[in-house]
Image (cartoon, grey):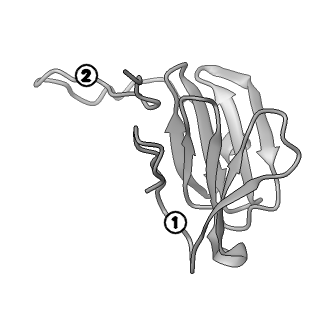
Amino acid sequence: SLGLSFNQLTLCGSASWNSSGLTMADRRHLGVYPNQIFIDTENMVYATSDDDDRLSVGQKNVSVSYQKLFNNLNQSKGVFLSEKGEIYIDNGAHFGRVEKWTMNATTPTIVMTVNGSCHSLFLGPDDLLY
């Protein structure tokens, strides 16, 4: 059976907010206007940002590891990482598409055409993009 490509946290019924929790990233890493954050099963953080149209990736609690992966995303709202390491990212606001980036690719594969932004993306266990 396929594992899930996203974290499913288990919270107890008495879970509460920790006001002294750690900051995993700030505007230096994610920009002033981050749109969506995705955390994979290895605790890698993927975030889209409007202020410089980028996808940033970094490791939780390691502030020097954040990198810009892609530029020219133009108001990307959604991001999802598949179990195979493929990155699905919204580029619909101006380019009318959702793209799939694979390891070491220099250009994306267009996997869906859209009429606007996709504010959330999900790849089901049947490899269907929602």
Q: Is residue 54 left or right of residue 106?
A: left
Where residue 4 sits, quadrant-wise, is top left
Please tell me which of labels 1 and 2 falls first in the chain: 2
- Disc number for residue 10: 2
Q: Is residue 33 above or below residue 96?
A: above
Query: Circle 2 sits in a helix, a strand or a loop, which is it?
Result: loop
Q: Is residue 129 left or right of residue 76?
A: left
- Disc number for residue 100: none
Q: How many marks?
A: 2
Question: Residue 110: x, y in percent?
Answer: 70, 60
Point 48% across, 44% down: residue: 127
Q: Is residue 22 above or below residue 45?
A: above
Q: Is residue 62 above or below residue 118?
A: above
Question: Are there few (<14), some (14-19), or many (20+) residues within 10 Å of tag 1?
Answer: many
Residue extending furthest bottom?
Answer: 115
- Disc number for residue 118: 1
In front here: 26 or 94?
Answer: 94
Question: Residue 68: x, y in percent?
Answer: 79, 42
